[in-house]
Amino acid sequence: MKKKNKRVKTKKKSPGIISKSTDRSAHFTDGDSYYFYNLGMLLGERKKTIVQVGRDKKFFDALEKGLKAANRSGIVFYCVDPDSVNETLNTGNNQGIFNSVEYISLSAVDCAKRFEDKSIDVIFLKGGYDFYNLYDVIDAWYPKLKDSGWLSGYCLFYDEGNLERFAGEKGLGFSILKRPLTDNIFELYPEDIVSGLKKIQDYLNCGMLLDADQVINRIITAYPHSPFLTNLKAELDYRCGKTLEAKKQFERIIDMWPYHVRAMNNLGAIEANTGYPKKARALFEKVLEIDPGNEDAIASLDEMGRLGL
């Protein structure tokens, strides 16, 4: 029986704390760069071949910093860019990270034919292709991904239908990381994650919180670089009564993805519920600095005002 597409969506109004600042080896002024940096920093040792489809210096620079922070080496990096001929990427002083860095002057779809199936660990699709829609590009590259690989990219406003169609036909799942967390980066999840997320929902429907928590623990071990999946784990920890674990996890999420306003709202709710209204208020106000129209933060501050907190 053909599997239905599992569209991954976040819930409204989940509980939430103040981030303890820690020293980072890199600071950025946008959420996308934090996403790329953490992708590089959290990749396992087995991740060796990375392909960027479409020129995006921000992706390479932030990813490189993340790889360096994690002491990764032996990476083979390709950038597919039809306008580039005999170019190499500037790798700064971090030559030891890469075995090779290469531009390939071919189109987004045609270049995929140069790679064997299940040979690439990470594929990032920049988007905005002149002759292809997102469906065609993912369809060309997804077979090249290893079973443990990771595919993500930018989802432009006209691409969501193509992304949903591809995921539905292949039995996959996806999430789109909206602003301010990222500038609409999507994550495409393989069947094992889709199956796991369905199990989590089934367990939650039956009140089996600990079983749901065990499933997300297995998922997050394999995919620690997803801000969506990581936040889901923290929310499940909180629902299972593991408030201290959830609090620490939300703090870690905010440190890694400083524009993750959902995690900030979650953390703020925990602080308010455990007797720290000043920390909670500071978090909700920080959310509104980043996202002035955030309904969860506005509602939380209104409620604290009514309670005199």
Image (spheres, rainbow, N blue to C red):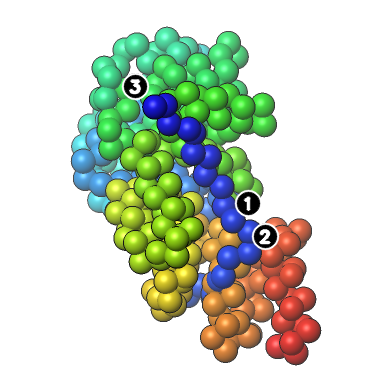
Label 1 sits on residue: 180
Q: Is residue 48 visible?
A: yes
- Closer mark to the observer between disc 3 and disc 1: 3
Q: Measure the alpha-carbon separation of dots 3 and 1.
A: 31 Å
Looking at the picture, how far across and down is residue 122, in whole percent? 35, 34
> From the viewer's perspective, is 59 left or right of 282?
left
Q: Earlier in the sequence, mark 2 or mark 3?
A: 3
| Callout 2 crowding tier (Cα within 10 Å): few <14, some 14–19, many ≥20 | some
Numbered disc 3: secondary structure = helix
Q: Residue at x 42, y 71 (%)?
A: 240
> From the viewer's perspective, is 221 left or right of 6?
left
Label 3 sits on residue: 143
Q: Do callouts 3 and 1 mark residues in contact (Cβ within 8 Å)?
A: no
Identified by mark 3, the residue type is Pro
Q: Do callouts 2 and 1 mark residues in contact (Cβ within 8 Å)?
A: yes
Looking at the picture, how far across and down is residue 244, in whole percent? 41, 78
| Callout 1 crowding tier (Cα within 10 Å): few <14, some 14–19, many ≥20 | some
Residue 281, above or below 297: below
> From the viewer's perspective, is 152 left or right of 287?
left
Q: Residue at x 45, y 65 (%)?
A: 207
Looking at the picture, how far across and down is residue 292, in whole percent? 75, 60
Q: Earlier in the sequence, mark 3 or mark 1?
A: 3
> Which quadrant of the structure image shows residue 115?
top left
Label 2 sits on residue: 290
